[in-house]
Amino acid sequence: MFNLAWLHEAIAARVPERECLVFRDRRLSWNDVHDRTRRLADVLRSHDLGCHRERAAAPPLAPLTGWESGQDHLALYLHNGNEYLEGMLGAFKARCVPVNVNYRYVEEELEYLFGDSQARAVIYHARFAPTLERIRAKLQDVRLWLQVDDGSGEKLLPGAIDYEAALAAATPRAPEGLTPDDLYVLYTGGTTGMPKGVLWRQEDVFRSAMYTRPVASSEEVVARAERGDIRALPTPPFMHGAAHWVAFNMWCLGGTIVVQSRPERLDPMDVWQTVERERVTALTIVGDAFGRPLADELATGKYDASSLRLLTSGGAILTAKLKRELLALLPGVRLVDALGSSESGSQAQHASRGADSAETGRFELAPGNVVLKEDLSGPVAEGSGEVGWLARSGRVPLGYFGDPEKTAKTFPVIGGVRYAVPGDRAQLEPDGRLRLLGRDSVTINTGGEKVFAEEVEHALKHHPAVYDAVVVGTPHERWGQQVTALVRLRPGEAPSEGALLDEARTHVAAYKLPKRFVFVEEIERSPSGKADYRWAKATALAAD
C-alpha cells in the first residue's frame, strides 16, 4: 500500500536495527522511530484526533471535494530535528495531517496560518512558546499543545504537555485504517501572496515527489529498502517541501536521515562537519543561496567530504558557474538540479558529473510533464521558441484547502486531462529539453517586453565579484517598469555597474539588462533559500 506511514512501518520490520534518524547525540534506529511515532499517534488519538470522514465517503455522504479534508490537522512549528520528522510520521499513523509552519512568521501571519489550516494540535519548540502565548486566545480550535524542550529554558505553557513526557506515557499501538487516500498537505511559502495549503493524496505525492522511479507494488519499495545504505543530509528547513520530500524519499530507500547540529540557520561549517563526522553520502541544498556559502567554506580545505556521492539542489536552480566550482571541489560527485513545486512534485532535472556538463536553466522533462501554450489550448511544439506554462498531468494534487476558485485556476482540465499549472514559464528546445525562464508572478513587463527575474539574476551571478543578486521591476515613467538589480558583492570587491552589465549581456539579451543597481549588505531570503521579492521591491523603492 502506498501510504507513507505503512511504508515506514513495513521497512522498519525488515531493518529494525539500522540507523534511521541522527540528530546531535540522538542516534535513533528504525525500531526507535517506529516506536516513538506509534506513541505520538497514540497521544493524538487520545485527544480524539484523526480521520473523521473518509475521502470516498459511503452514501448518504458525498465524496469529499478536492479542497476539503476529512482529517484533523497538526501544525508543526519547529526547527529541524528528530521531532519534526517524528511529528509528520506520527500524524500519518494517527491519520492526522501534518501542516508545515514557517518559524519566521510574525504573530499576524501565524494567526492566519493556524486559522486557514484549521489546526487542531500543535507541536512546537519551547523557544516559540512566548509567541504562541500572545496569540493562543485566538486559536480556539487547538485542543492539544505539545512542547519540545530545546534547551532555551522557556517554561511549559499552561495546559501544554511536554513532548517527551507524552511519548513516555503513551502506548505504541499499531496504526489502523491507513489508506492511499490519506492526505498530505504542504503550505506554500506565500512570497507573492497568502500561503495556500496544497492537498495531495499520499499515494500521489509519494509517486510524484518522494519516489519518482516507477514501481508496481509497495513490496518492491520495501525489498529495495532492505539493500539501502544511503546517509542523507537535507540542509533546508523541513518546513519546506524540498527538505522533507528528500527525507521521505531516502527513508523509502531504507536510508538514514542526518540533521545538522545547528539547524536554526545555514551554518556551512556545521554542515561540512556533519558530512565528515557522519560520512554523509547524499546532500541536499537550495540553489546558489545555499551552494555559494557551502562552496566557499569547503574551499578552505578543512573538511573530508569524500563520502559524498550525490549533491542535489531543489527549490531553486544552481548557476553553471557555481556548479563547476562544486564539481571541482567534489570530484566524482553526481550533481543534480531538481525542478518542481508544491503543486506539481518533481517535473524535470539536470545531472552533471563534470564541468563540461554544467549549465543553467536547461532540464530533461520527467514523464507526464509538458509546456502548455500561453492560452492553455494545448502543448507548445519543440523548438518553436514559444513561451508557455510548465505543467504536469497524471498524479497531481487534489486542490487548495478551502479554496475552490484557486483550485480550478491552478489545476485546469484541458482536453479532458487535468493539469497542475503552478506558474512557471518555459520553452521547449529542438531536442525536447526544457528551458526554464522563471515564475510568472515575478516577471517584469518593461516597454512591452517580458523579463524573467531569475534569468537576469543568473546572468549577474556569473561575475566573480557578485556574491548574490535579486532582480525586481520598479516603476518607470516611459517603460512602465524597469529592471532593477539588488546586488551583494563579495568582500573587498567594487566592480563598476558597467562591468556587471558587460558580464550579464553575454548571457541575456540587452533589453533584459538592469537599468538600475542597488548595492546591499545582505539579500533577504527565506530559510529555504528562496528570494523574498516583496522585501527586494520595498528595498529598491526605498533606495530611490
Image (cartoon, rainbow, N blue to C red):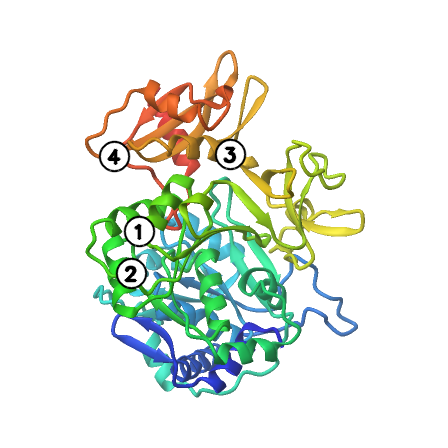
User: Which circle, 4 or 2, is nearer the viewer?
Assistant: 2
Say left or right for 397 vs 532: right
Image coordinates of residue 268 in percent, x first then y, are 26, 53
Q: CA distance from mark 4 to mark 3?
A: 26 Å
| Residue occupied by mark 2 | 305
Q: Residues within 10 Å of mark 4 (few under 14, many from 20)?
A: few
Q: Is residue 532 above or below residue 217?
A: above
Residue 442 — which label?
Answer: 3
**Local SS, label 2:** loop
In contact (CB < 8 Å): disc 3 and disc 2:
no
At x 32%, y 44%, the residue is: 292
Name which residue type carries label 4.
Arg
Say left or right for 369 vs 61: left
Name which residue type carries label 2.
Ala
Closer to the chain start, of discs 2 and 1, is 2
At x 62%, y 68%, the residue is: 203
User: Which circle, 3 or 2, is nearer the viewer?
Assistant: 2
